[in-house]
Image (cartoon, rainbow, N blue to C red):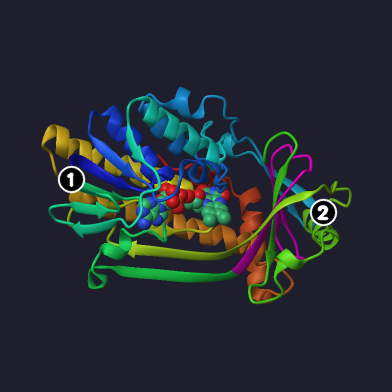
């Protein structure tokens, strides 16, 4: 069996690429290891940045993908319980992200692709990339040849590992910070809320009309916060969010995320192109992981369409540099943001605690600093 592009993985990167190629008349087949319900139910990101939303608008997909999504208006940063309101859109001429839970985005992308006749195969096992220059893929029960392969199979996928190790340079960074995240039946905040305090960082985001997603900083290597009694968790949230009356509710989901960053360079090898978490991992600070995956998919869709439809292959060798430039820009932003809101903790180095406070104060005293922060949060437009 043969096609133009084989896409490995049906997450945000793979499904965005599949929809964009389909809209451009490029034949593609998506191979996904898990079953449909697993793919549709995985909860992760919550915010599509402005640039991410623009990708779907430009492709004529905004009604299908982001129709009724509420726009991000305000971020409340409570410093030792004192509220500070940051209205991002006021600094960016209205540009802002939209609140779209990742699993809703994936569901809509999947339905749009399949309803338009897209070839998406679930439960595909033992995928092997046999040849990357004349792409040939085998899997349990089948074989495909293609002009190009898009590796959209996440950090633990097969694509990056199919590139000869001496052709890749990888960068890893452990931020030394853990997040304990709980989903609870607790009334959601009016807007995104972050608590910065000597007790440690905490955050609260809406997850539907009756639920909230909370994050609490913890010391990796210490006691596993999933063993904390719920009363202790609620006490810590009230302390860090500076809200003694925060209503408790049943906790329905408990997870820990250790903050780490990873980048593989280059993001392509012969006719294999990596997109999304297959190439890079960024901390959830600043909500850029999913958005970087969409950005990669948009750049790759343009380059593959130009090569396969218009005979112009120039976008393919440029793909990796264009995506890495944005990836490192967001890695730096996410690290800056992580330090600003986590280094206030009592266990931090006193000098770094003062730096964190200086970064915070600058946001509310220096209009250029505020505009830059708002621009990074909204998502910077695609480089021409
Ligand atoms: P994904 O990992 O989403 O998708 C890869 C797909 O490939 C999966 O469907 C998988 O089943 C499939 N696959 C894997 N191996 C395969 C194989 N060998 N063969 C075939 N298919 C294979 N980002 C944000 O922007 N904001 C957040 O708040 C945020 N919070 C997060 C919280 C957590 C706990 C985690 C883990 C991540 C979070 N992220 C967040 C980042 C996350 O959203 C990723 O950036 C995003 O899912 C990346 O999308 P993909 O690159 O498509 O990879």
Q: Are marks 1 and 2 in contact (CB under 8 Å)?
A: no
The local secondary structure at tag 1 comes to strand
Residue 245 in percent (x, y) is at 89, 48
Q: Which label number is shown at residue 146?
A: 1
The answer as to whether callout 1 falls within 8 Å of ligand 1 is no
Residue furthest to the front in view is 141
Q: Is residue 192 magenta?
A: yes
Determine whether, in the image, residue 300 is placed left or right of residue 49: left
Q: Residues within 10 Å of mark 2 (few under 14, many from 20)?
A: many
Q: Which residues are magenta?
A: 177-206
Q: Residue at x 31, y 58 (%)?
A: 159
Determine whether, in the image, residue 210 is placed left or right of residue 176: right
**Who comes first in sequence, dot 1 or dot 2?**
1
Q: Quadrant of residue 133?
A: bottom left
Using the image as rendered, state which of residue 158 and residue 12 is in the foreground: 158
Residue furthest to the left in view is 311
Give the spatial CA distance, label 1 vs label 2: 56 Å
Q: Quadrant of residue 357?
A: bottom right
Above or below, comparing residue 354 to residue 193 in the picture: below
Mark 2 lies on residue: 242
Q: Residue at x 15, y 37 (%)?
A: 308
- Image depth: mark 1 or mark 2 in front: 1
The local secondary structure at tag 2 comes to loop
Above or below, comparing residue 14 to residue 274 in the picture: above
Q: Residue at x 38, y 38 (%)?
A: 16
Residue 172 in percent (x, y) is at 43, 70
Determine whether, in the image, residue 37 is placed left or right of residue 4: right
Total labels: the figure holds 2
Q: Is residue 339 magenta?
A: no
Q: Residues within 10 Å of mark 1 (few under 14, many from 20)?
A: many
Q: Residue at x 76, y 51 (%)?
A: 251
């Amino acid at each position: 069996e043969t096609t133009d592009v084989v896409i490995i993985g049906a997450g945000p990167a793979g499904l965005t690429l599949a929809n964009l190629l389909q809209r451009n008349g490029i034949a593609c087949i998506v191979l996904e290891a898990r079953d449909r319900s697993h793919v549709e139910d995985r909860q992760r990101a919550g915010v599509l940045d402005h640039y991410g939303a623009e990708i779907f608008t430009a492709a004529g997909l905004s009604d299908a993908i982001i129709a009724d999504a509420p726009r991000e208006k305000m971020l409340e940063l409570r410093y030792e319980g004192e509220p500070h309101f940051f209205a991002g859109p006021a600094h960016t001429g209205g540009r802002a992200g939209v609140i779209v839970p990742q699993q809703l985005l994936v569901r809509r992308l999947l339905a749009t692709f399949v309803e338009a006749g897209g070839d998406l195969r679930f439960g595909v096992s033992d995928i092997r990339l046999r040849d990357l220059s004349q792409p040939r893929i085998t899997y349990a029960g089948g074989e495909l040849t293609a002009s190009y392969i898009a590796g959209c199979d996440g950090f633990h996928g097969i694509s990056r590992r199919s590139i000869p190790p001496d052709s890749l340079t990888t960068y890893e960074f452990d931020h030394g910070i853990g997040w304990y995240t709980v989903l609870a039946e607790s009334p959601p905040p009016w807007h995104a809320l972050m608590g910065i305090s000597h007790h440690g960082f905490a955050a609260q985001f809406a997850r539907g009309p009756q639920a909230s997603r909370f994050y609490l900083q913890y010391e990796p290597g210490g006691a596993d916060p999933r063993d904390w009694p719920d009363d202790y968790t609620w006490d810590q949230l009230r302390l860090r969010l500076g809200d003694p009356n925060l209503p408790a509710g049943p906790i329905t989901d408990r997870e820990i995320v250790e903050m780490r960053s990873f980048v593989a360079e280059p993001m392509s090898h012969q006719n294999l192109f990596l997109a999304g978490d297959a190439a890079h991992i960024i901390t959830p600070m600043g909500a850029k992981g999913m958005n970087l995956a969409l950005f990669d998919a948009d750049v790759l869709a343009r380059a593959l369409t130009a090569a396969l439809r218009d005979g112009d292959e120039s976008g393919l060798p440029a793909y990796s540099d264009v995506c890495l430039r944005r990836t490192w820009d967001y890695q730096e932003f996410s690290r800056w943001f992580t330090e600003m809101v986590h280094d206030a903790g009592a266990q931090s180095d006193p000098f770094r605690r003062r730096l964190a406070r200086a970064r915070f104060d600058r946001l509310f005293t220096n209009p250029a600093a505020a505009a830059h922060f708002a621009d990074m949060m909204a998502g910077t437009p695609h480089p021409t």
